[in-house]
């Protein structure tokens, strides 16, 4: 199972400027899907229940660029997603995906290094999405 960020082919081809054209939702998925470049919204089962809510991402304000790699990286601030209890359906978060707000395209996705199961008393999942904007996928 890969734990690398997978970007869609259009992001890989067009790079940093392309991903910054849209606003997104950062969502968690619970199904046993391994992201690939041809991924589509229907491939993911979004987490549900347990107080879960997706994150709204404003690409003009929320992305930071790091030019130490070629191509550069796009980094979101650390995400802290709080849960009030267990999820409904599949209780384990497998990874995250970045989807356009019109829900038409998934731009990036990653399996978590370790799946996360929110405990019955609630808990918080923390991670920092880092996307190499074209031609590669940092771990």
Image: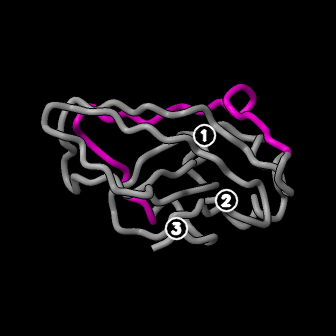
> Residue at point 44% right, 31% down?
80
Q: Is residue 112 above or below residue 1?
A: above
Which residue corresponds to mark 2? 138
| First reached walking from the N terminus: tag 3 or tag 2 | 3
Residue at 67% across, 29% down = 62
Mark 1 or mark 3, earlier in chain: 1
Decide: few, some or many residues near mark 2? Use Cα within 10 Å; few <14, some 14-19, many ≥20: few
* SS under mark 1: strand
Query: Which residue is rendered at x = 46% and y = 45% of the image?
Result: 27
Which label number is shown at residue 35?
A: 3
Tell me if mark 3 has few (under 14), some (14-19) or many (20+) residues whose alpha carbon lies within 10 angstroms of its own: many
Q: Position of residue 44 (x, y in %)?
A: 42, 60
**Label at residue 127:** none
Observer-nearest of 23 and 136: 136
Using the numbered discs, state the Cα–Cα distance from disc 1 to disc 2 in whole angstroms. 20 Å
Count of labels shown? 3
In the image, residue 51 lies at what x, y percent? Answer: 26, 31
- Badge 1, how many Cα within 10 Å: few under 14, some, many 20+? many
The residue wearing badge 1 is 24
Image quadrant occupied by the N terminus: bottom left
**Which picture quadrant has residue 10?**
bottom right
How far, Cα to Cα, is label 3 from label 2? Answer: 14 Å
Q: In which quarter of the view is residue 132 placed?
A: bottom right
Please state which of the two labelled residues, at mark 1 or mark 3, is closer to the viewer. Answer: 3
On whether residue 85 falls in the magenta region, the answer is no
Rendered image coloring scheme: one colour
Residue 108: image location, x then y, percent: 61, 55
9 is higher (above) or lower (below) than 23: below
| Label 1 with label 2: CB-CB less than 8 Å | no
Q: Which residues are magenta?
A: 43-67
Q: Secondary structure at mark 2?
A: loop
* Helix, strand or loop status at disc 3: loop
């Amino acid at each position: 199972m890969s734990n690398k960020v997978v970007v869609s082919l259009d992001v890989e081809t067009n790079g940093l400027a392309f991903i910054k054209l849209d606003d997104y939702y950062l969502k968690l998925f619970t199904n046993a899907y391994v992201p690939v470049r041809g991924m589509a919204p229907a491939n993911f089962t979004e987490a549900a229940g347990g107080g879960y809510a997706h994150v709204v991402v404003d690409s003009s304000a929320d992305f930071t660029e790091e030019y130490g790699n070629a191509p550069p990286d796009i980094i979101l601030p650390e995400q802290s997603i709080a849960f009030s209890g267990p999820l409904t359906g599949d209780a384990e978060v497998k990874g995250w995906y970045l989807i356009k707000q019109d829900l038409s395209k998934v731009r990036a996705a990653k399996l978590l290094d370790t799946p996360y199961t929110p405990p019955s008393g609630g808990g918080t999942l923390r991670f920092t999405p880092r996307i190499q904007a074209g031609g590669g996928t940092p771990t």
